[in-house]
Structures are given as C-alpha cells and as structure tokens.
Amino acid sequence: MKQSLLEISQMSVSLPFADKTVDIISDISLTLDRGERLGIVGESGSGKSITALALMGLLPGRMTVRGSLRFDGQDLVTMPEDQLCRMRGRRAAMIFQEPMTALNPVKSIGAQIAEGRRLHLGESRSDAEKNARYLLDRVGLAAPRFDLELYPHQLSGGQRQRVMIAMAIACQPDLLIADEPTTALDVTVQAQILDLLDELIDETGTSLLLITHDLGVISEMTERIAVMYAGRIVETGPTQHIFGHMAHPYTQGLFAASPHALFQTGQISAKRQRLTTIPGGVPDPLQRNIHCNFADRCQYAQNDCKKEIPNLGPVDPSSSVDHCIACFHPHLSKRMA
C-alpha cells in the first residue's frame, strides 16, 4: 500500500485588495503518494503556479494560506520559516518556469549547484564541487565544454534548464515540483528535458508534481491528473482514464484545443482536423462568481450552474476508478459532445 507524501485538504490562498480579500485558490484538495507522478493542468491564470509556490512556502508576502497542507505528516502552513528553509532543497525542490530569473546571474553554475549540498548535507567545498561536476555530467552538460565556472548568461535556455534540474536533484529530494519545465524551449530540447526528468525520477523514486498547460507532456509524464480552472480543481483521476473518458466540459475544451491530446486519443485522422477554441478567458480573481466559474464559457450550462458552485465528487459512484468532477451535468456534456 502506497504512503501519502503530500496531503492538501481544502487549501485556499487569499490576497487582500483595497476593499476586500479575494481567494486566488479555493478549496484545493489533492494527495501525492511516494514515488507517484501527478500533473496539474489548466490555462494560464488557473492558479497552477500559485499552488506550487504555496507548497514551497514561497508565496508573496501579502498572500495567506488557509486549510491543511501536510508534507510527510508535517504541517507546512504553520511550519516556522527556518524549518521551511531546511526542508526546501533537501526534502522538496522546485524547477521554476524561467531559469534565467531563478538562477543567480553573479554566481557560477557550479557554485549554485554545490550550495545546496554544502548547506543541507554539510559537505566540504571540494566534495560539493565534485558532486556538482557529477550532476552537470548527469544532466548532459559534460566537461570540458561546460565548466563549473560558467555563468547563466553564457548558456542557452535549454542548458540553463538543465542546470536548474541539477540544482533541484542535488540533494535527492522526496518531492520534485516542476513548474512548466519546458516553457520557451524548442520541441527537440523539450523532448530531451522530459526524457532526462523521466530517467532521473525513475532512478531516485522521487515523487513528481508536474505543472503544465501541455497535455502531451502530461500524457507522457504522469499517472494522475488534476485539471484546474479559476483557482479550483474541476476534474481529477488517472491520466489515461481521463484522456479516454473526460467528463468536465472544460477538460473537453482543453483536449479539443490540443493537437497532442487528440493524437493520443486517436481523434485526429489522416485528414486535417481544425482545432477548436474555448470562447472567452479565465476570469480575473476580482470578477469570479459565487457559482460555477466556467458557466459563462460552457455550451452545456443550465440554470443551476449559475446559482452555486459544484462540489468535486465521483463521476460514477459505482465505479472502482477514482475519477472526480466538479460539474452539475457531466452526463449532459458527454451526451451532447
């Protein structure tokens, strides 16, 4: 039986504005087992990155967290900052979206990789540098071309992302959060980075929380998926099951707009098929409703969809598959799709 490493229960993240406090994230509940791979997918503005920052205790100062957020049994919400600092990098690590802003421009890449091992594992400078050299080799930045004394600006985007991965895995964390790890990389480099992550995670047994808008990446890299919209989870379940049995109209819209997903499910034939788009956009947190926030974009919306927020519950209570959805009329959307 698998053990839960990360348990999130009814987590909300709020931000005060001039006359009110607004929830950016609302009632998120997720679990991640040891060695498991979970993907969070959704459009920009859905709250994916804020969720990741909340897990790492890196939210901007004005944002506050409510609910339960436990990592290996420890409460992250009430954990003192010094204890969080000891956990970050050692037990949980994060690959950020843009390595050029995440890496220190005035420190060599070798020093930045070695820093974590010196801080968390107490290694000497020479031992940490030897391990930094090994890690750079491991992520495909081999000597002598990629010296420890190089600086981030001397590397390409894909090379900087590899440095970020080396930093993240330096202390062999239990949890690796990858926030859009292939953003702004060309297709070939994206494939190389994903293959590298896949190999490293298999080797170490690290749990992966992968955040992306790319359904093709989700299909290749994860076992379970959580679909986010306007700060809420709207659908969860085993990745391949959802790819074949998507129930929420928003999930259906994402798949219909993604060539990767359509190829995966065999919905694109030899003939060219026009991709669809979801009308409108993700609502600003200040403009969110007290009913289903997708109702204004949903072609299947009924009167009750604009009266209250649907709870996340099983699509089919009699099924053994843990497939949940926050929608009043999932069967209507499947019947009319």
Image (cartoon, helix red, strand yellow):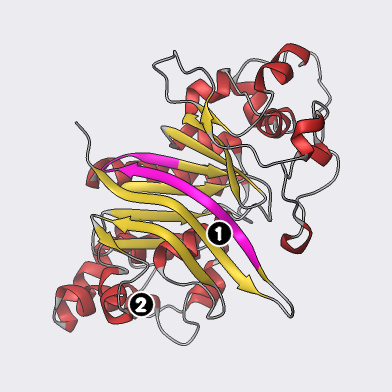
Question: In the image, is 335 to the left or to the right of 129?
Answer: right
Residue 158 on image: x %, y %: 53, 58
| Quadrant in which the N terminus is drawn | top left
Q: Quadrant of residue 222?
A: top left
Secondary element at tag 1 = helix
Secondary element at tag 2 = helix
Front: mark 1 or 2: 1
Q: Is residue 198 above or below residue 159?
A: above
Question: In the image, is 136 to the left or to the right of 240?
Answer: left
Residue 176 on image: x %, y %: 36, 54
Residue at the (30%, 72%) spot, across then down: 79
Disc number for residue 157: none
State which region is magenta. 22-38
> Does 94 lie within the magenta span?
no
The residue indicated by pointer 1 is: 49
The residue indicated by pointer 2 is: 112
Tell me how far mark 1 sits from mark 2, CA to CA. 23 Å
Q: Kindly report the secondary structure that dominates the magenta region of the rendered protein.
A: strand
Q: Is residue 294 above or below residue 173?
A: above
Residue 19 on image: x %, y %: 74, 78
Q: Tell which of 230 and 277 is nearer to you.
A: 230
Residue at the (69%, 27%) spot, across then down: 252
Question: In the image, is 44 to the left or to the right of 195?
Answer: right
Q: Quadrant of residue 153?
A: bottom right
Q: Is residue 226 above or below residue 5?
A: above
Residue 80 on image: x %, y %: 30, 78
Q: Tell which of 143 and 148 is nearer to you.
A: 148
**Amino acid at circle 1:** Ser
